[in-house]
């Protein structure tokens, strides 16, 4: 590492802290910055500062937004009585891309994970309960990821919402569209058979 | 993309301009920045600005440095009469890591590539000739990459240095250490046989 001048080394170190970026990739990125225009480096630097300064958490759904209430929560065309519970904002973007959901969201900002020491107070579960308590919500769709932590979180949320007279649903697990039964793992295929629907 | 607030979108766009970073990775990096401390975003931003402000090209070897003369050129323990010609600063770091080269470098900042319109005036070849003209250099080791452009550049440099009474050498091509003959491409294996040495 010491073959590079100190400012280059520092940039490599900072890049290496990003997820999925090792020392080699970080070096490649730093060299790219060195070879690109001053304008690009300045624009990237400004975006980094801006995003931390301007982005806040939406008061309603905990989506990230540059306004107090995010664009989805302030959209009058969306249903208020269906709330989709997701782990993070990338899940929100993924669901929005489908174009099939016209309700509101509730971003947990994490999942329960006893192994990592993440309990119910570390994610926005109580905030969801308070939202449901108001009485306007008819259905909560739990769209946490179908893995150990996501499933545990889904079960926990189902439990805490049991006392309310609302529908609590879970997104379907099964074989992905366009895939081959032959290559699907047994757990997924098992869930697909268990969750079969009438034609 | 429009599911994110404008400052997040802008950061994703800026990240996407980095080499090897597509929209998905850029989004993951942006979300990481959102979830990390303000300090980290500020440090990365500062490094980006610093590297463009402080890094200049070494007057001697065209390595990138925060000084007029880079640390390698100003190192009195290194030989002045052997110069290793490389394409870019990442090659310099790669060779330094071997610890086996104690001469100086000459960074071309590119290779000849007629297809990309890069000619001899676009890389630091004349500067190398001027260095050799001074008469102190005994050997020039050409360490451009062993691909079409790198080989063409090596041949071109050999030609322009022909009139000088110095040794011009090329790093060896052959099978990498620890590899299996069976899995080596024919071109490399051919070069390895052609370049065989006496035991």
Image (cartoon, coloured by chain):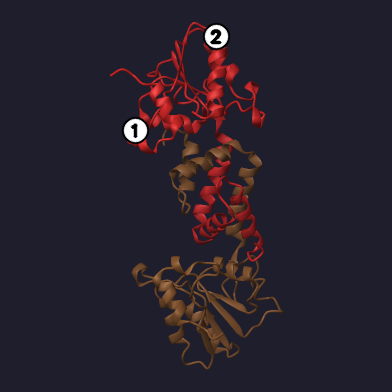
Chain colours: A brown, B red
Point out the frontmost of discs 2 and 1: 1
Q: What crowding class fits label 2: few (fewer than 14 Cα within 10 Å), some (14-19), or many (20 or more)?
A: few
Q: What crowding class fits label 1: few (fewer than 14 Cα within 10 Å), some (14-19), or many (20 or more)?
A: few
The residue drawn where x is 56% and y is 78% is A84
- x, y percent for residue B152: 56, 23
> In terms of secondary structure, where does tag 2 sit?
helix
Does residue A133 lie above or below A124 as drawn? below
User: Is A105 positioned to the left or the right of A124 in the image?
Assistant: right
Does residue A26 lie above or below A126 as drawn? above
- x, y percent for residue A74: 68, 76
Q: Quadrant of residue A182?
A: bottom left
Can residue B93 be seen in this snapshot?
Answer: no
The residue drawn where x is 37% and y is 19% is B77
The residue most toward the right is: A77
- The residue under label 1 is B177
Pick the quarter of the image with the N terminus of chain B. bottom right
Q: Chain of mark 2?
A: B
- The residue under label 2 is B133
The residue most toward the left is: B199
Pick the quarter of the image with the C terminus of chain B. top left
Q: Quadrant of residue B81?
A: top left
Could you say which is closer to the camera, residue A176 or residue A48?
A: A176
């Amino acid at each position: 590492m010491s073959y590079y001048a100190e400012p280059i080394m520092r940039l490599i170190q900072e890049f290496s802290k990003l997820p999925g970026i090792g020392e080699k990739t970080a070096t490649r990125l730093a060299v790219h910055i060195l070879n690109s225009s001053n304008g690009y480096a300045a624009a990237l630097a400004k975006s980094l500062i801006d995003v931390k300064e301007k982005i806040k958490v939406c008061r309603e759904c905990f989506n990230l937004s540059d306004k107090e209430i995010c664009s989805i929560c302030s959209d009058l065309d969306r249903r208020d009585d269906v709330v989709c519970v997701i782990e993070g904002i990338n899940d929100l973007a993924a669901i929005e891309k489908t174009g099939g959901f016209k309700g509101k969201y509730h971003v947990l900002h994490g999942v329960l994970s006893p192994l990592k020491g993440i309990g119910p107070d570390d994610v926005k579960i109580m905030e969801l309960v308070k939202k449901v308590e108001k009485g306007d919500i008819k259905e909560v769709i739990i769209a946490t990821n179908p893995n150990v932590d996501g499933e545990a979180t889904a079960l926990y949320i189902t439990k805490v919402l049991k006392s309310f007279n609302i529908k609590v649903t879970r997104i379907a697990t099964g074989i992905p569209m366009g895939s081959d039964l032959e290559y699907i793992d047994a757990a997924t295929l098992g869930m697909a058979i268990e969750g079969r629907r009438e034609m």
